[in-house]
Image (cartoon, grey):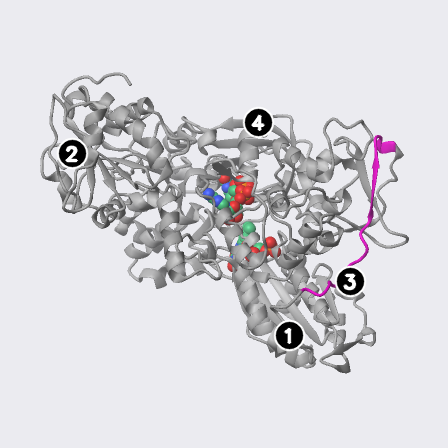
Amino acid sequence: MAAAQMPDSAQSAVVQAGGDCQELQQLHIYFGSQTGTAEGFARDLGDDAASYGMNVQVHDLEGFCPRSFASDVRVAIFILATAGEGEPTDNAAGLHRWMLKVTPEASLTDLTFAVFGLGDRTHANFNPMGKLTDGAMERLGGRRLCKLGEGDDSDDIVRDFQAWTSQLLWPALEKLLGVSVSTGGEHLGSESHLPDPVLRVSANVSTLPPEGPGKPADVLARFYFQAEQVRVTGVSELRQSPSPEEGLSTVQVDLDLSAAPGVLAGYVAAGTLELLPENSPQDVAAVLPLLGISEAAKPGDIGDLDCCITFVPVADGELRKPFPTPCSLRHALTRYCDLRRAPTRQMLTVLQPTLQSAAARERVARLLADRVAMRLLQHEALAVSQVEFWAAFGVERLDLSAFLLHCPRQRPRPFTVASSPLASSSRLSLCVSLTSHLEQDPSPLEQLAGLLQARGIDLCQWPERPARWFGLGSKWLCTQLRPGDSVLARIRPSASRLPSRDVPVMMVAAGAGVAPFRAFWQELSAAETARTSPAVLFFGCRHPDIDWIYRSEMTAAAASKPSNAELPGKASLAELAVAFSRRGEEGIYDPSGCCGEHVQDQLSARGAYIRSWFQGHGVMYICGSNQMAQGVLEGVSKVLEGGDLELQRLKAEGQVVVESWGEAPKLPPELAAHGFRAAGQSEAESQEAKVATLRLARSRVVWHSMRSSLEVVTVLLSGCGQPERQVEKEKEKPFNGARMDEESGSEAGPSAVIAPQSLSDFSVSDDVYLVEFYHPLCGTCQEFAETFAALKLALGSSLKTVKVSIEDAAGEKIAQEVGATDEGIPNLRLFYKKSEIKGALVMANEDPLPSASDLKARIQRMLGGPKDRYFKSGSEEV
Ligand SMILES: Cc1cc2nc3c(=O)[nH]c(=O)nc-3n(C[C@H](O)[C@H](O)[C@H](O)COP(=O)(O)OP(=O)(O)OC[C@H]3O[C@@H](n4cnc5c(N)ncnc54)[C@H](O)[C@@H]3O)c2cc1C
Ligand SMILES: Cc1cc2nc3c(=O)[nH]c(=O)nc-3n(C[C@H](O)[C@H](O)[C@H](O)COP(=O)(O)O)c2cc1C
């Protein structure tokens, strides 16, 4: 409810608190939220406050009324996110404007307040809305209830919020309101919600009542009503060598604005487009049994996916619309329900009493009473989906209406506009790269189940997960979206815009981070008023033949001749520098990246150039992943005379502008393999469990550069191998240091036995070593043993094939030194002391395991150079 409609204090409830009958002051919780996180926190807080017997109201800041706030509100809690670059969320714009202009005469001396700000520390300006509000309320005479709370969305924002509420807010409220709060206790009930509207279903839209007046139910619903439908005109792959199944795809998506009636048509180069992703048909199909829907149901049945639905209010109540209707059930599940997110507290509170199974009701009740368990289940690193959650809690059927109303809402994803309206006013382009990673095996979900069990919540089986995790929106855009489809989108301003003054512009990007700069070079080449200051682009990718996106456009923009010789800046790019992180010697692809270069390396090598750039009032734009942006900023701060302080100044003055986005979040510490210890388990048992976990673990692939002085080479091997018998025999050979199972030695070139005490043991001779790091108890390593033996046979004579067990301390140390333990086992590498080609990581922890012929082909590709460089003769086919 908006502040303008707040009930006055006369409506404060009289409740029983701590045995005394007291009149409670009303607690007002306000939220400023763009994508629903702050709103969720505010609603959960309201729920908790109500369950502790407090008299509470939760307010969307949209329509904030300063006058009634000042006159009616005595206790206020603000939960505020920051959007844009340091800007308020759309719904908090009114509060923001008021705070900036209000004078201390508009005194809030009767107000007691607390503020929690949601932000992201990777942004230049962390949590400005929280800080501004905390300061403004104090300046206006308000009394601070507790210290400003800050949540960092680049880390664990839910943990930050829980810590702030349990350690600061609840104790302070207990004192102020005289109620008893038990933060660890049972969840008693919930804030009185408006009754849910009623679902109406029909085979035919004409027989449904028209959607009546009402308000969007929450900030995300507001997006659905405000955003515009836009038609897709093109989806084209930009990588030279894409492989979507391995997570490697970058596409350009073109949207047709000629028919877009609203603000989209007035888009600006490098602005931000918020786009609502869609669930895949497979994800929708997976949730149907839970909702009692069958794709084979008769048209018009409630179980028919193509039936039409709408909601009507109960009696004369106000309709709070979850999403636009009438629409088909398929559309509602595809577009508006976030099926990849675990249920929220609010969803569970509503659905728990309706669950048929008593055991499931009990499990969910326990979960609702356990904040730690709740936080873990909702942690984004675990990405527990609706289907996974309900299966694990033993729930087979949910009420369709309640599900549609309370399932977490789908959030729009922001993308940087990669085109300029000056180049094409009716077409807006995006450049999107696929987000993905290999799932950990064993899955942390298993550990989560163990941890919950120790907390008294006994889960059923988790459904099996595919080996690779894909981001929802980027997968949809890269693999499903087709020309002719339409998408729901809205435009937002962005900090990345060309400077209005004619100053030098330096653009630094990697991968899809080039999006705003494509818009810039289009803008620059089309600009009517010519700029004379240069614009330069530093671009990073892996390899020119693999993922140099926009290669021809970029090089053409750099090569374009000035249309007027007196305007040297008319060429849109005065300079183009490209860094290839995986290009090895002689231009071959080198997966280890040891010889490669990143954009920051190029910048660091040009210290004087960068300094003169800033002295000439130049602006540097950086765009790409958080990790890339961090690397570039560190590189720049090193070459600046004032170091980091100077960099901060340049950022504050708008001479350095960063737009970056996320990576895989870290697992919560409770679930890190080393830290997991179930309650009641002794230290020794826990240690044993840890060792077992480590033995069996095949951790996520992380590509590392070799820091060792030892050179690693790519090799192509030849000759014939030794018989299996010999492999077995040599496996047993004892060594004085780490156990190294040497499998080489053949007619063409017998191997020396080396005890690998250290890395240097691999360079005692001129031999090439193919080394497998493994653990004898690792199931996958055991599975791989045959392949390794076959590979050895195929590769042959002039190398030593060696297995190093990480069970032994020395072996583990070497594996750690080369990064093999981080990359996961089994881990296959090539070592050669004299080669100039570095970084020969052949394979790490792959699923499914590659075949011997695949590995051999990889090794051949990795070598790329003359075959006899390292090998004596041709190899056999596997
Ligand atoms: C201002 C802005 C501009 C952007 N512009 C672009 C652009 O031009 N082009 C572009 O491709 N992207 C851009 N992004 C990123 C984009 O918005 C999406 O975040 C990205 O496409 C992933 O969305 P998704 O739906 O595929 O993943 P989701 O399903 O939303 O999953 C991503 C979430 O999962 C978690 N996660 C788990 N594993 C990973 C992983 N391996 N990598 C990343 N996240 C992981 C993260 O915490 C993240 O919150 C931009 C982001 C912002 C904030
Ligand atoms: C486009 C965008 C811009 C953001 N800008 C900032 C910022 O300038 N400073 C900051 O601390 N956090 C920033 N954030 C982080 C959000 O405040 C944070 O993710 C918050 O949890 C979002 O809450 P919400 O879901 O309620 O909108 C930004 C997030 C996005 C998506």
Of tags 3 and 1, the one toward the viewer is 3
How busy is the neighbourhood of tag 1: few (under 14 within 10 Å), some, or many (20 plus)?
Answer: many
Q: Nearer the viewer, residue 346 or 459?
A: 459
Residue to which mark 4 is pinned: 234
Q: Residue 594: x, y in percent?
A: 26, 40
Q: Residue at point 48% right, 62% down?
A: 680
Q: Is residue 429 visible?
A: no
Secondary structure under tag 4 reads: strand
Residue to which mark 3 is pinned: 192
Let me know if residue 384 is in the magenta part: no
Distance from disc 2 to disc 3, alpha carbons, whole Å, reads 72 Å
To which quarter of the image does residue 366 belong? Answer: bottom right
Of tags 1 and 4, the one toward the viewer is 1
Residue to which mark 2 is pinned: 835
Secondary structure character of the magenta stretch overall: loop
Of tags 2 and 4, the one toward the viewer is 2
Q: Is residue 35 visible?
A: yes
Residue to which mark 1 is pinned: 113
Q: Nearer the viewer, residue 764 or 568?
A: 764
Query: Residue type at mark 2?
Result: Ser
Q: Which residues are magenta?
A: 187-206
